[in-house]
Image (tube, rainbow, N blue to C red):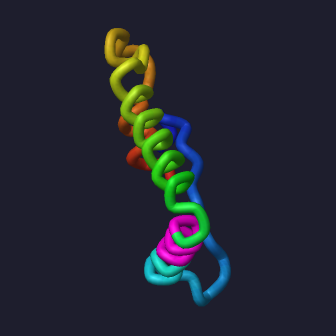
Amino acid sequence: LDLASAPNFRPTFKQFSWLTSLLGLVGCAALIFGLRPAYACGVALACCSLVIALHLLSPAASEPKWGSLSQALIFHQ
């Protein structure tokens, strides 16, 4: 994590678990898809396209001296 300089998320409250995070994600996704499905699909497609473009066009792919963007995306929490 130090090599990629990826920030870490360390919650301090006791009720935190992966299940509460998943519940929040599902709730937010359901709300945005319930309100504006076309916008939600567009934003999801744009975000996925941006991540794929950053992965493929990263300068680290040609110069291995820099940290890998793929590793930073994997470890980003």
Residue 43 picture location, percent across and down: 53, 47
Residue closest to the eye, 70 or 41: 41
Report the label total: 0
Q: Position of residue 22 (x, y in %)?
A: 46, 75
Q: Residue at x 58, y 48 (%)?
A: 7
Residue found at x 33% / y 10%: 62
In which image quadrant can residue 28 be found? bottom right
Residues 18 and 56: in front is 56
Write the start and end of the magenta stretch as one range.
25-33
Residue drawn 34% across the image and 23% down it:
56
Left or right: where does residue 60 sit relative to residue 15?
Answer: left
> In this rendering, is residue 31 above or below 56?
below
Q: Is residue 27 left or right of residue 22?
A: right
The residue at the point 56 percent across, 52 percent down is 39
Residue 54 location, x and y as percent?
A: 44, 27
Q: Name the residue furthest top.
A: 62
* Magenta highlight: main SS: helix
Q: Nearer the viewer, residue 12 or 32?
A: 32
Q: Is residue 41 left or right of residue 5?
A: left
* Residue 30 belongs to the span the image colors magenta: yes
In depth, the one of 21 and 13 nearer the eye is 21
Q: Is any part of residue 52 visible from this angle?
A: yes
Q: Position of residue 20 (x, y in %)?
A: 52, 82
